[in-house]
Amino acid sequence: METALENTGLEEATAEFATALVRGTLEHIESIDQTIGRLSVGWDTQRQPAVDRNILRMAMYEILYLDDIPVSVTINEAVELAKKFSAEESSRFINGVLGTLVRECGLPERKDMAAQILDGLATAKQIREEIKADVERFIADTGVMPHLAVIIVGEDPASQVYVNMKKKACLAAGMLSTVHELPENSTQEEIIDIIRQLNADPGIHGIMVQHPVPKHLDELEILAAVARGKDVDGISRESLGSLVTGNPLFIAATPAGIIELLDRYNIPIEGKHAVVVGRSIILGKPVALYLLNRHATVTICHTRTRDLAAITRQADILVAAAGKPEMITGDMLKDGVIVIDAGYNKVEGRDRDVGDVEFESAAQKASWITPVPGGVGPMTIAMLLKNTLKAAKQAAGVA
């Protein structure tokens, strides 16, 4: 075992990590391996190289038996080693298992413990690769290419960017994507007529209307016109109603992406107190319902909630989705909270977009946090692709 630990190349990283920890790790190897086995449930450990287990062994020894090393330092070092000697998936595996260990053991929180990153960009990349492979199998079996139709009304620059991103993502996954660009002054009837045509077209599997639509239009009525079997955006009245009853066909892409990100990092939801700040039909309300369906205790807040901080400090999981720049700060959070920042805001004078959470202060309190950008955003597109493929499978009778 000592040879196995020493011959992984770890000694090339740092002398301290590769040599000084070996003896202590070996002394506790049996209990450490039992812990790894228990916390690895849900991960495909057959695909994890041997170096991952050795990195985990030594990191667990540091966390469980050495009190003078901050947990955040140990986890960050282990993740960097995995990236250097193994693969990106390995670093997420190690990050997830060690994070679960810290939460499960109720280890003392340290003020110098920075949050671990919930990497939506890397996770979405993996999901999109999985979808691409699944699309290839589906086309080979059925001869059908999944097809997403997107309707955009007006020339809002941000919407144009999002629609182009979705089209490129579809093409990269081996799907078709058709964009119907309508003028700003389009009438309700004209838009609904196009939706009805798409509903009746068997070659179209998913339909989404880019949000927001011009103010003179009734968005809820437009969304209600989308056939349930093609509502891959999951925000029509019927789709939201099915989420209330617990049997949704499609879940809105952003809420689905948030839950998928938590699941991919093996972060438990059941029994947790989830606080959602925001109540929109495309995010706040559906993510609250989805969390409730996953057996979390859910509190919904918004920008008019009185004494918001008193409620957010109770959260085990906090989802910020109010559309207000950096409204959630570190002093509004309890230690160890999991922070999902679904905001994306442009602020005059800032050289980058910001979320609804003030990242630097929140990261000193949270155990896990999503960055902006690179957190929730990439997951949204990945889930839209996943829903479109699901719709194509159901239409072909192979779901």
Image (cartoon, rainbow, N blue to C red):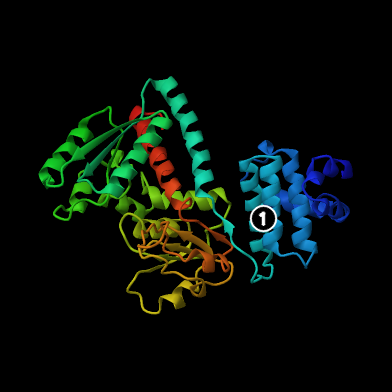
Residue 24 picture location, percent across and down? 86, 56
Seen from the viewer's position, the closer of residues 24 and 40 is 24
- State the image coordinates of residue 154 (x, y, percent, origin top left): 19, 46
Residue 67 in the figure: left or right of residue 259: right
Question: Which residue is at 42% across, 66% downward?
Answer: 326
**In the rendered image, which quarter contains the N terminus?**
top right
Residue neighbourhood size for the residue with mark 1, other residues' Cα within 10 Å, grouped as few (<14), some (14–19), many (≥20)? some
- In this rendered view, identify the residue nearer to me: 136 or 111: 111
Instruction: Say which quadrant the C terminus sits in.
Output: top left
* Amino acid type at image mark 1: Asn
Indicate left or right for 369 with 44 as reference.
left
Q: Which residue is mark 1?
A: 76
In this rendering, the answer to whether 278 lies above or below 392 is below
Number of marks in the image?
1
Instruction: Find residue 5 and report its image quarter.
Output: top right
Task: Residue at 64%, 57% (x, y): give it.
Answer: 99
User: Is residue 343 placed above or below 183 in the rendered structure?
Assistant: below
Task: Describe residue 173's horizontal placement relative to residue 179 as left or right.
Answer: right
Q: Kindly indicate the quadrant of the structure image that contains residue 335.
A: bottom right
The reply to whether residue 389 is in sight is no
Q: At 42% from the left edge and 39% from the top edge, which residue is drawn? A: 386
Residue 165: horizontal and vertical position, in percent? 37, 40
220 or 109: nearer the viewer: 109
Secondary structure, mark 1, is helix
Across and down, in percent, residue 69 comes to: 75, 64
When asked about the image quadrant of residue 27, the answer is: bottom right
Residue 300 visible in the snapshot: yes
Q: Tell me: residue 270, above or below residue 224.
A: below
